Amino acid sequence: MTDIHESLDALATHEVPATNLLPRISARLNKEKSMTPRTKIVWTAVLTLLGLALVTSAGYALVRYLLDPGLNSARQSGLITDVNATALPTAVHATPEWGQPSPATQVGLEQTISGVTLTLNWVYLADGLQAFGTSTRDLPADLRLGLPTISYTGVVPEQYTGALWQTDADENSLYVAYQIVRSGVRDGRVNTTIAIPLLRGSETLGAFHFELPSVPVDQVGGGGGNSFAVTNNGVQLTQQNLSLSPTYSEALVCYSLPTAKNWLPGGVSLRFIDANGQPSSPEIPASLVEVISDDPALRCVRLGFETAGVQYGATAALAIKTLTAPDASFDYGWYFYTGLTNLLMVPGASSPGISTPTPQPVTPLATETIGDLTATLQWAYIDAFRASFRLGFTGWQKDYFINGVSLLNPDGSEINSSLGFSGDSNDQSNVPIDFQPLHALEGETFLGELRVTISNDHLNNSPLAEFHFKLNQPIYPAITLDPMLTTTANGIEMTLTRVSITPAFTYLYLCYNKPTNGDFSDWQVSFQHSPVVQIGADKSEISTGMLLYDRQMGDIGKGPEPGWKTPVDKDRCMKVGFTVGHHAQPEQLTITIPSLDLSLPEVIPADQVRAAQKILAAQGIEVNYITVQGNGGGGAGFDVKKKPDGMTDQQAYQKLIDALGYNRPGPWIFELEINP
């Protein structure tokens, strides 16, 4: 989990408590990685920022070999095969998932106003975002370009979620708007109008105006790069746009007035964060807070920042720490994160920092883009419940990433399996890979194939090279026990009906009565208070969990074990997995289930939040409830603002779960002897 934790932590700043996962999602997450349910501490839905998806699943479990008791014991028992097999790269020609983006339309039109010449270099329109680039000559220090507007004949854009206008030191500018341009587009083209005001302070001297007939509209999907709407304790702020320049920057933020008072933003600052998640600038306090629209239903405020001499990064972070009125305040905190436009990867669409916006050809999918890249399968291990490998690469380039890993049957069909992989934190060319098949692998020998695809296309994840490793590995079988042990804790009865163990993995089958029943009664074996399985001296926390049966749901159909029937009269049965196994000798197995947790809904009802906040306030704990919407997705979570000395954020979060009534503590403990 090291790399995913590093990436999530990369954008955290000292103003944002550790439990707030939103600001930690970094531009470094452009490689597919997996995350165990334990990482899902606060956010019930994960925001996909910068057009890059972060996938979570209860079945995913990333394995670190040296920290994995199951694979450690398998190694010590001589069960891991050192393959030392080498595969050479194979060129792959495939259609990208979203289609290959069309090049930007090169324009080259110039206009001059008040002695300032502006060139519209290119335009790129897509279904989910629209962008264009300009360059300027003879712009005096007291003048600047205002926020552009872009419009379309016969088309009204929908679902607007913000815009970015970014200018570099050479007066090259890039504009990106996140909205849907679809209804009314004819034959994939639309007439487009772009207007860019020329400003002296707040005075408009004129506007550059470009009429562009029949601009192509790409249908390549799309993704976002900003958080647009942030709601904290029911108060929502939206970042309508952000304008960045080497001297002065502005943001437009809008919100409905919480009450009939003169509410204004306070504690406003802007800072920049580099691609490694480190601050590239200090906090820049707002030099301007100006109300520009005062409709009671929606107040809009312009926020200005002096950015002379400031070093940009991969992300701009806007913080509004409070809304204040003459006799009241909401000290909640609203944080907006915007991926800067050097992430826009469209042929011919140059971004600020590139002085000459010349068209860039589409790179063909061919082996020359990876040179002498060689992949080595360093070791392999397969048992009934998991298949683990380690790959090493030589000739690895920093922009390469793994964009596909599959475990195939001899007939070429893909095995339905959860998957975790990640490069070593110090060496991205060495990658552990771990599969946990949905259905147990059978037989004495596995004769399938490991397939790994490499890419350097961060827009479409188009394949660059594909490696195929033929496998001829022994399958170490599982032993299965049906102990039917029952214990009761806190009024809840739980039965351990089955235990299945391999040398590197253990599955438990647990059936229990739920603390509550009704429309929302998804009581699960807790991942927050992780169950622990100990076999001999080795122990492991929970890795994966699957629902087998629920009385209210009835037959769940094609679950993890089709045809499985509950052997006891209980409300629910779960199958939970742990990365610890037997040691081929008699020893004691101890199982500790600390609690049952009620799954958090994507949005917790406001009355429940208020009731919980009241309970927490009596304990000296202040927690805000935040929801976020962006053009890449949305999420919800809690922000710990105040807690007693010595209390960790995790402890405060658990107090919150208790106050919500979403936890039923145990523990339920089972002990039995095994003799593989």
Image (spheres, helix red, strand yellow):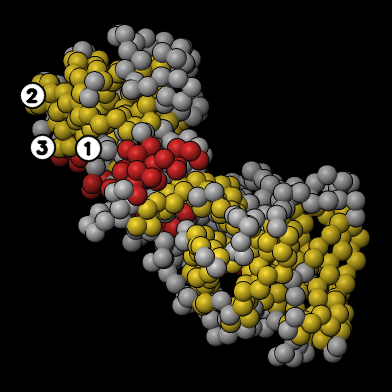
Q: Is residue 392 above or below residue 311?
A: above
Q: Nearer the viewer, residue 559 or 114?
A: 114
Q: Is residue 420 above or below residue 386?
A: below
Instruction: State how far apart marks 2 and 1 are (Cα).
Output: 19 Å
Q: Nearer the viewer, mark 2 or mark 1?
A: 1
| Residue, disc 3 | 537
Q: Secondary structure at mark 3?
A: loop
| Residue, disc 1 | 540
Q: Is residue 502 left or right of residue 248?
A: left
Q: Secondary structure at mark 2?
A: loop
Q: Is residue 66 left or right of residue 266?
A: left
Which image quarter holds the C terminus? top left
Q: Is residue 467 visible?
A: no
Instruction: State how far apart marks 2 and 3 are (Cα).
Output: 13 Å
Q: Nearer the viewer, residue 495 or 349?
A: 495
Residue farthest along the front direction in this orientation = 327
User: Residue 557 in the image: x percent, y percent?
Assistant: 48, 15
> How many marks do you count on the picture?
3
| Residue, disc 2 | 586
User: Residue 221 in the image: x percent, y percent?
Assistant: 68, 47
* Point 90% across, 51% down: residue: 154
Question: Nearer the N terminus, badge 2 or badge 3?
Answer: 3
Q: Is residue 332 above or below residue 41?
A: below
| Quarter location, residue 69 | top left
User: Residue 391 in the image: x percent, y percent?
Assistant: 36, 48
Mark 2–mark 1 contact, CB under 8 Å?
Answer: no
